[in-house]
Image: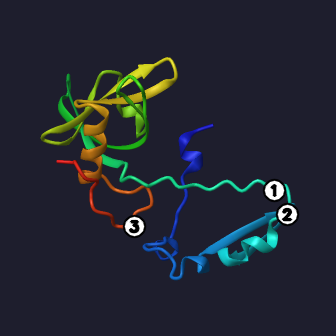
Amino acid sequence: MKLSDFDFDLPEELIATRPAQPRSSARLLLAQGDAIADHIVRELPDFLQPGDLLVLNDTQVIPARLSGLRHRSGAQGDTAAAMEVTLLEPRADGTWAALVKPLKKLREGERIDFAPDFHATLWRGMTGRRICGSTDRRGIRCRAERRGGHAAAALYRRAPRRGCP
């Protein structure tokens, strides 16, 4: 399986740029067996049965897609390659799990420059590949919020979190 197997086109007009008003009018996709049907959130109680488990996702989307350049000096001179890094989650050791595209153009220990004062280095850990930035985890997140983009291009526009430089 390749990472590219998960690439798909999402037309801009299908990306929600702001919450539905009222919120209860948001779209709901119901899958029952082989059937899939469109509904709205206010109909959700009609589908729940005693004993059902409802899981709510209150995660916040961060602008975790970063574009940068990998520079390399070699026999053919200096070269640069455009790189895209999507931060997935911070790790306890201060690194971030991340997807890097194109990964084949980046070697372990090489640096990606996102801005003059913001870069990351590819490290290989026991759990796969990850990105280690030049600052602590909070610094990477704050910098991503200032310079990054959303994985779905036109998602909610939010102000950076408090405390981010």
> Dot 1 corresponds to which residue?
52
Residue at 81 percent across and 56 percent down: it is 52
Residue at 70 percent across and 69 percent down: it is 29
Confirm or deny contact between disc 3 and disc 2 (CB under 8 A). no
Residue at 59 percent across and 46 percent down: it is 5
Q: Nearer the viewer, mark 3 or mark 1?
A: 1
Mark 3 closeness class: few <14, some 14–19, many ≥20 residues within 10 Å: some
Q: Nearer the viewer, mark 3 or mark 2?
A: 2
Secondary structure found at label 2: loop
User: Of 133 and 123, which appears nearest the observer?
Assistant: 133
Confirm or deny contact between disc 3 and disc 1 (CB under 8 A). no
Quarter of the image for the N terminus: give it.
Answer: top right
Mark earlier in primary sequence (3, 1): 1
Q: Amino acid at mark 3?
A: Tyr
Confirm or deny contact between disc 2 and disc 1 (CB under 8 A). yes
User: In the image, is 113 to the left or to the right of 83?
Assistant: left
Q: Amino acid at mark 1?
A: Asp
- In the picture, residue 44 is in which quadrant? bottom right
Mark 2 closeness class: few <14, some 14–19, many ≥20 residues within 10 Å: few
Q: Residue furthest left?
A: 116
Secondary structure found at label 1: loop
In the rendered structure, find residue 49 and report the number of the disc placed on it.
Answer: 2
User: Of 132 and 74, which appears nearest the observer?
Assistant: 132
> Dot 3 corresponds to which residue?
156
User: Of 145 and 68, which appears nearest the observer?
Assistant: 145
Give x and y (percent) for residue 118: 19, 39
- Residue 80's place in the image compared with 75, above or below, is below
- In the picture, residue 131 is in which quadrant? top left
User: In the image, is 165 to the left or to the right of 47?
Assistant: left
Q: Residue furthest top?
A: 126
- Residue 106's place in the image compared with 117, above or below, is above
Secondary structure found at label 3: loop
